[in-house]
Amino acid sequence: MAYPEVVRVFATTQEPDFDSPWQTRSPSSSTGSGVVIAGGSILTGAHVVANATFLQIQKPSHPDKAIARVRAVCHDCDLALLEVVEPAGFLDDVHPAEIGQMPRLRDEVAVVGYPIGGEEISITEGVVSRIEVQRYSHSQRHLLAVTVDAAINAGNSGGPVFGDGKVVGIAFQKLSGVDNIGEMVPPPIIRAFLDGVAAGKRPEIPAFGIHTQNLENPYLRRRLGVPDGTSGIAVIQIEQGGAADGVLAVRDVLTHVDGLAIANNGTVSWHGKHRTRYDVVLGTRYVGDVMRLGVLRDGVAREVEVTLAPWRPLVPRARYDQTPRYVVYGGLVFQTLTRDFLGTWDKWWNKAPKEFLNFYYLGVRTAQREEIVILTQIFADEINVGYGHLYNEAVATVNGATPRDLADFVARLDTATGVVELTTTSGGVIMFDAAEVARAMPRILERYRIPRDRSPELPPPTR
């Protein structure tokens, strides 16, 4: 039988409900693909098992299924490792696949898996057509990816791509609107994931925590002190708490990253073969690694070291296997602005409130504001009459202070006495009496069948 190491993954998932964050949506079922590797583990895609409550795997042309669980997952690079729970020895007769080397352009590959439209294994063939950094739709991270012209359809996700008899990629997405343009996670990122799991590393791809601008304009380069024959990119924003915080400064010019020269268009020559984004070097590194950067500051060249940190944008990108945080106060529901909440709008990039989109695309974490607290809905009650039009706005102040994050916002509400004044970014004003809110909350929660006034991750009320 061809490719006996390729298995089908059956997932039952239950996603959070960001419109009503105290509950989840109805369970749903989906299928994906995976491949058995050394140690009896199954390598698949993180999006195949995201928010999973129950997992099973099935071998080719075998009617019985085994119960599986997630051993490790990295949503950033869309990879997951599963292990069989029962029956014991289910994979003993399967010879594991080997992870191969990085394919080259025009190499022939075979995408193997279980796409929709049938029950048996499917094999489609093609060639490698592009190798560069791409946006991973599951995490919104930009990482190295390999493009192939073989068909990758729903159900193929998480399945292996073979070249010369070895796994040279894991299928994870296809380009919409065109035919036969799919993308796979390449071997360097697969190996970094597997090595990180074995070493107990944090399952995240690190980030520099900076926003940059290309330096293709010669006058701008001169003004920033970049000498002739030197190229680089300018640092224009630094995220609080990121790897570069306290190390780099705004208007520093990055000239080298991990020994690679950065061109004025923000690219490097990766392995001397592929010109792609300078942050390609992050895909095989771990949180806590130290990386050397070449910097021009006021025209003076220097080398600095940064300790790589997790990516923490002002508006968190898609998150999985965790519930949203919220608090209900006086019938008003407050949450943190996230990419998941934006997704409650159909075509959110066009239909979501423009203020929220501005925070998403342009916002930067600062010491004063690490999250955006938003008012998402209002449950009508006599205590909040007249405030019903202020939903889907960001909170500007609580009793005159800008909340640093949702935990800080909740702490300010819990400790407030007398008048509680909230302002929104549109200029709206909401006033409550703290004692009246405390008396009203039990009836509001009961009336609208809300089990608790806040998510379990937040500290309980202090009174």
Image: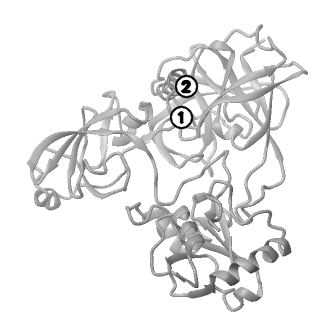
Tag 2 near tag 1, CB within 8 Å: yes
Displayed quadrant of residue 148: top right
Going from the N terminus, do you reach mark 2 or mark 1 first? 2
Q: Secondary structure at mark 1?
A: loop
Q: Quadrant of the N terminus?
A: top right
Q: Position of residue 79 (x, y in %)?
A: 60, 33
Q: Quadrant of residue 71?
A: top right
Residue positioned 83% across, 48% down in the render: 27
Most extreme residue toward the front is 463
Residue at position x 51%, y 74% from top? 355
Going by the image, does 230 lie left or right of 416?
Answer: left
The image quadrant that residue 259 belongs to is: top left
Q: Which residue is disc 2 drawn over?
A: 197
| Residue 305, position as x, y percentages in the image | 25, 38
Whether residue 378 is visible here, answered yes or no, is no
x 76%, y 8%: residue: 92
| Residue 149 at x, y percent in the picture | 58, 35
Q: Amino acid at mark 2?
A: Val
Residue 401 showing in the rendered view: yes
User: Image check: 339 left or right of 82?
Assistant: left
Cα–Cα gap, marks 2 and 1: 7 Å
Q: Quadrant of the C terminus?
A: bottom right
Compared with residue 253, is residue 197 higher up or lower down, i.e. above or below?
Answer: above
Is 314 located above or below residue 288 in the figure? below
Which one is in front, 156 or 310? 310
**Secondary element type, mark 2:** helix
- Figure check: 5 above or below 82: above
Of the residues shown, which amino acid type is indicated by label 1? Pro
Residue receiving disc 1: 203
